[in-house]
Amino acid sequence: MDDVHVVRAAIAAGAGTIVTYNLKDFPDSVLRQFGVTARHPDAFLLELASSRSQVVFDALKVLVSEKRHPPRGWGEELDALRNNRLYGFASWAEAILASDDS
């Protein structure tokens, strides 16, 4: 495993999860012995959104409203999420945005 330093940092910080696109370099068989898991960012964000929906949506609203360099609207933010392979999270955000009345 090339990213031993990442696992060591997670253990030292008491983090139970490493969030990475690079799952192939973090095999479950190795991480399990340290009580750590690796999650794809999309899966991690969807789990967070599932457990704390309003908090996550409020954070997204702040992100979009305060983004200045360059400024982005919701459409651009959703595109950026998808461009970063956060397809499920972007779909969740789009659905909750459509149902939001604030």
Image (cartoon, helix red, strand yellow):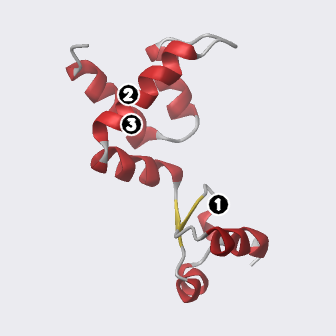
Marks 2/3 in contact by CB < 8 Å: the verdict is yes
Q: Compare residues 15 and 21 and report the one nearer the observer.
A: 15
Q: Which residue is mark 1?
A: 22
Nearer-N-terminus badge (1/3): 1
Q: Residue at x 54, y 76 (%)?
A: 36
Which amino acid lies under the numbered mark 2 shown in the image of this protein? Asp
Tell me residue 66's x, y (percent).
56, 15
Which residue is the site of mark 2? 58
In contact (CB < 8 Å): disc 2 and disc 1: no
Q: Quadrant of residue 87?
A: top left
Q: Is the residue marked by circle 1 packed among few (<14), some (14-19), or many (20+) residues within 10 Å?
A: few
Instruction: Give the x, y percent position of residue 51.
Output: 29, 50
Which type of secondary structure does the marked residue at label 2 adopt?
A: helix
Label 1 residue SS: loop
Q: Determine if residue 24 is in view.
A: yes
> How far from the left and from the top, in percent, is residue 21?
61, 55
Mark 3 crowdedness (10 Å alpha carbons): few <14, some 14-19, many ≥20: some
